[in-house]
Image (cartoon, rainbow, N blue to C red):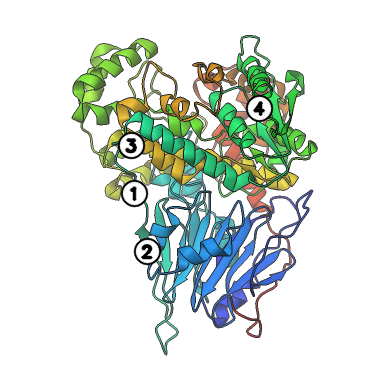
Amino acid sequence: MPGQLRDYFVVLPDSAAGAAAAGQLPVPEAAAGRSSAPDAAGPAREVGDTLTVAHPSGRPWVVARPLVRKVSHLARGEDALVLIGPDRVPDAVLADILQGARDRTGLERRLARLPGLYHVVARLSGESWIRGTATGLRRIYHARHPAAGTIASDRPAVLARLIGAPLDESALALRLLDFLPHPLSRRPVWRGVHETGAGYGLALPVAAPGTAAVPGPTEHRWWEPPPGELPLAEGARRVKEAIAASVRAHVGGLDRISCELSGGLDSTVLAFAARETGPASLSLLTVAARDRYSEDETWARRAVEAARNTAAGTAPALDHHVVPADDAPYFYADLASTAAELNDEPLPVAPGRARAELLLGRARATGSRYHLTGYGGDEIFLGLPHAYQDLFHGNPFTAWSHLGGLRHQLGWPLLPTVKALLDRSTFPRWLAGAVTAAPQPVARTPLLSWGVRQSPHPWLTEHARTLIAEEFRAAAEHAEPIDPWRGRHVDIDGVRMGARHFQAMEDIGMTLGLPVAAPLYDDRILEATLAVRLPERISPWRYKPLLVEAMRGVVPDALLARTTKDHMSSDEHQGLREHAPELAELWTGSRLAEHGLVDSRQLLRLAAEPFSPVLVEHSISSTVAGETWLRTAENAWPTSQSTPTTTPSEAPL
């Protein structure tokens, strides 16, 4: 059955209705290559693929199907802590975190020392506290079950299944844009399902004594970005420690691991950091580029040579696999394969799924037990021009000096740059005009606002445009930025957007039976980065200066000197031509067209004209993602299913 959810957890209320809801959870098919059951410890109940952690009453509290993630749990009296993430957390560490944590504030102070990408579920004084990560890679959703009350999960589709939620057409229309800014990115595509914002957690109170009524859920902020006060040297030390800790949390102790080594700085950093964890075997995989001017493969080979030349006696066996360019599918290849995973939402990376599957399949063939990527490096370390708005307030001369270098590189005209720099539009005002019928901004438009202005694609219907405009107007009425400073808002929103997209890679890995991780999305790395003084963290004259300084001594200096970055736009445009028949088939009987959101006749014409100027100006990726996701979601559930549940006779956690 296509589109199965292979990995999820739910948090249930302590009631008979909550226990009954556990029996309605979807049963995923086993992924290819599954070699072991999820870890379990203590008196929690494990049946098949399901791990159930109970309330003190014995009813199910947390029901998890962690295909590749590990569940760590511990109780102290009626209080309990569950961490779901890349590795088992020792009981001693859990006990140290839980001990003395009388409320969620005290708990979060202790959790701040924990590296890795974990979901947190805690029971303190009878209240359940659930949260994901500040980077947004781990998210929390909740919905009101008609009988059980509020149920939380890391997967919106699970909640949609439990409450019988229909699709939200407005939210689906929003996903047809290239960029979906905060707070609209939080709109799940099912009605009645709600996403808790990154940096916020969900509190689920218990019923009052002697009553069946349970108060509604409340959201509380647990994370604040740190002030940017550290000098580069101190910030680099913290970043180095955070990267090492995050990589260890994912692959520490494993004998065979693999890394994507594109040749770019981020993947090179991850490859050398992975080597430091001491695996017996490290496989590095590079996909050769068709573009003869590409430099990535050259730099990847240099990295492998440097790693071998600097290997100590205890260094892992290192093998380098270069995938020939002709073996790599173009974008938009094998669009039907996107039905293999039911992502949380349509993700614009869907047209590249066949490329990702090839690389991960080659990694799995090496015997790798975990695959690391450098995703997140651009969003966290590159820095966006919007940050100079922040710098201008406190240090206008430095800001103008940096902008001078940036203007020279990007060709920004002087007067528009000055005007953009002096603009003081509020975030709600910007959001209200973020989608416009005016032509898209040209490359030389200064980017110093709260985000990127965009126009709807020409194949969207008037109905879709109306829905989008209404959603932006409604959001602008009550919208608050992630951070009061414009540049920090854009930086954090960009990180969360990238983290959201990476979920597709994780799901492909689960389909193949290979865990895939992006350790750079660890909260500790984001915090260490934001804590550095702005003019030292980003610079028009240096490429990712903070990351470069952080990895000195781990990555050879010759590799840290790279200042270029390859792009694959030619493969995308060529993919439109190579896979025109598949795209035409996709638009024939389009589900988006049935919802009145796209003009399928125009899309069919564009499929026959892959080099049309329209497709040069407008990317079709988000529309392809929306169409393929919608078809998967329609066929996601088996006709009958059952889930093992904890019975009152089973020992509670």
Tag count in the figure?
Answer: 4
Q: Residue at x 59, y 27 (%)?
A: 268
Q: Position of residue 88 (x, y in %)?
A: 61, 57
| 143 or 70, nearer to the observer | 70
The answer to whether residue 148 is above or below residue 277 is: below
Do the residues under discs 1 and 3 have CB atoms within 8 angstroms? no
Residue 512 horizontal/vertical position (percent): 74, 44
Q: Which mark is on residue 224? A: 1
Which comes sooner in the sequence, label 2 or label 3?
Answer: 2
Element type where label 3 sits in the image: helix
Q: Residue at x 22, y 26 (%)?
A: 392
Separation of disc 1 and disc 3 at Cα?
12 Å
- Mark 1 or 2, closer to the camera: 2
**Spatial CA span between label 2 and label 4:** 48 Å
Tell me the kind of residue under disc 1: Glu
Q: Of circles 2 and 3, which is in front?
A: 2
CA–CA distance in space, label 1 to label 2:
15 Å
SS for callout 2: helix
Name the residue carrying label 4: 331
Give the residue number, with chain letter if any, for mark 3.
Answer: 488
